[in-house]
Amino acid sequence: MRRARGTGAVTVALAIIGGSALAGCAAEPPAPRAASPGAVRSRVASAPPASVSPSPSASIEAKGRDQVDIYAADRPGMLSPVVKGFRSLVYVPNSESGTVDVIDPETYRIVRHFTVGALPQHVVPSWDLKTLWVNNNRGNSLTPIDPRTGKPGRPVPVEDPYNLYFSPDGKYALVMAERNNQLDLRDPHSMKLLRSLSLPCRGINHGDFSADGSVFLASCEFSGDLVVLDWRTPSVIRHIHLGHMSMPQDVKLSPDGTVFYVADMERHGVWLVDAATYKVMRFLPTGRGAHGLYVSRDSRRLYVSNRGEGSVSVVSFRKRKVVDVWRIPGGGSPDMGGVSADGTKLWLSGRYHGVVYVFDTRDGKVVRTIPVGAGPHGLCVYPQPGRYSLGHTGIFR
């Protein structure tokens, strides 16, 4: 039995939501976990350092929710001058094929296909918006793509790049080294390793930053944990155990900056975590195999891909509840993706069906199903509105 350590342990009783386990984002299944109570345990690993505000959303609360929108620069038409000449394309990493398919979103046809390193997981826009990085997890490399042409460049050696994020100031690339259980801070251009942070959890793979950019909340899929990190130091601020039946996945901060939403594929829904106190507020059921999280262009809704049942749940940020469900005719496995620049389409990979789904966000209907390679995963719709990229398949501010 795992026990919370330290004086900051807090236990919050939660009902366990049943269901059989689904394979997570990882390429290989995690080792069996020891049984533990179905509860959330949070412990403070250390006092927040001076560089990090102990309440990152306190100033937001003071201003009022209606006055804050961290996605205000992501509206339709608000493309950075850096990307205005880039051709609009959709980049699909096929994990099992070791390839990338490039789709023209106007014709829905594949216009380019190329080989990359072993087990490509995600295609990630760089902080400066000038490069797309293919995360070759098992190939231990990053393949750069020039978004002006859509063509790949020479791979850069990087160990265990399951996922990739960038610090809000653009100084660091944050590599989620999933099998090594660590966060690697690298130069965002050369990808030279600068420092590493070992983590008290297994399978780090997704995350998002607080509104003021000082804190990075990350999910650890294999151990059912969340970790709150000061990326500048770097150090662990808090360790939150969601329970042995949890498999946390994607993370997104609410537009008002007060709540982190965390998808949980084994609990079939999303956790709401207070962004000021890091306490779990409650659990919101969405659908079987809740996986990816995407914010609508008007910042009103969160799209949750339910990979285990072939649906997308639409969550209202204001109401904090599911207001609609879009279903794929005949079922499917919607995984990772992104919203089109104009906000009218949601593109998601069909992980176990070798396809890409295109949803119309106005009515929730699937308008196209496009065959691609085997095991499509973290596709990237690019370019998108925003001043800079925080990573993953497209988190922009």
Image (tube, rainbow, N blue to C red):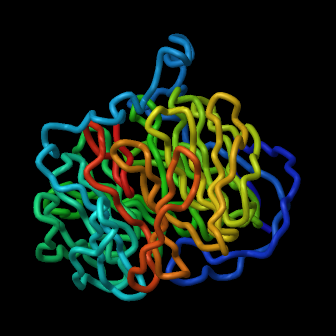
Task: Out of 241 and 1, give the one closest to the viewer.
Answer: 241
**Relative to 43, 163 lies left or right:** left
Q: Position of residue 137 (x, y in %)?
A: 37, 77
Q: Quadrant of residue 98?
A: bottom left
Task: Out of 11 and 346, give the one closest to the viewer.
Answer: 346
Q: Residue at x 44, y 76 (%)?
A: 376
**Relative to 267, 357 lies left or right:** left
Quarter holding the C terminus is top left
Instruction: Name the residue furthest top.
Output: 63
**Relative to 120, 16 lies left or right:** right
Q: Residue at x 53, y 66 (%)?
A: 335
Q: Position of residue 369 (x, y in %)?
A: 48, 71
The number of discs equals 0
Does residue 217 sit above or below 374 in this rendering? above
Q: Residue at x 24, y 53 (%)?
A: 126
**Relative to 259, 271 lies left or right:** right
Q: Residue at x 54, y 61 (%)?
A: 366
Q: Position of residue 73 (x, y in %)?
A: 33, 31
Q: Quadrant of residue 337?
A: bottom left
Does residue 294 sit above or below 1 in this rendering? above
Quarter holding the N terminus is bottom right
Q: Position of residue 342 (x, y in %)?
A: 36, 42
Task: Out of 17 and 221, give the one closest to the viewer.
Answer: 17
Residue 224 in sight: no
Residue 336 in sight: yes
